[in-house]
């Protein structure tokens, strides 16, 4: 089913978050340091959190990157 976004603020947050995904993926492909990747991921998750009314914590990022195999 198609997704309907009813708030301009949500649409703009999705655009900003989605726009940063290629940067994150390119960084992963190039073996960029996890600290820099975490900053991009934090931005993306922050935009999603704006829509959902949630905050992204350092603990969540640690959990995500603990399961992330970079450059291996």
Image (spheres, rainbow, N blue to C red):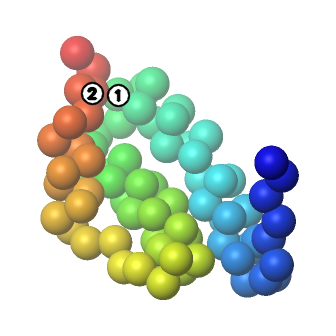
**Image: 66 above or below 29:** below
Q: Residues within 10 Å of mark 2 (few under 14, many from 20)?
A: few
Q: Visible in this render: residue 52? A: yes
Q: Which mark is residue 49?
A: none
Q: Residue furthest front?
A: 1
**Which of the two residues, 36 or 55, is positioned nearer the viewer here?**
55
Identify residue for label 2. 70
Asked whether disc 2 touches disc 1, contact meaning CB atoms under 8 Å apart, the reply is yes
Q: Visible in this render: residue 43? A: no
Regarding mark 1 in the picture, which secondary structure is present there? loop
Upstream in the sequence, badge 2 or badge 1? 1
Task: Estimate the spatial distance between the alpha carbons at disc 2 and disc 1, rounded to whole Å.
Answer: 7 Å
Residue sitting at 41 percent across and 32 percent down?
28
Regarding mark 2 in the picture, which secondary structure is present there? loop
Tell me where residue 63 appears, x and y as whole percent: 18, 51
- Whether residue 6 sits left or right of residue 36 in the image: it is right
Q: Which mark is residue 31?
A: 1
Tell me where residue 2 appears, x and y as whole percent: 83, 52
């Amino acid at each position: 089913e198609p997704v309907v976004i009813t708030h301009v603020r949500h649409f703009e947050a999705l655009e900003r978050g989605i726009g940063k995904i290629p940067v994150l993926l390119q960084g992963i492909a190039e073996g960029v340091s996890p600290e820099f990747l975490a900053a991009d991921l934090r931005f993306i998750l922050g935009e999603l959190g704006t829509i959902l009314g949630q905050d992204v914590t350092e603990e969540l990022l640690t959990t995500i990157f603990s399961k992330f195999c970079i450059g291996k």
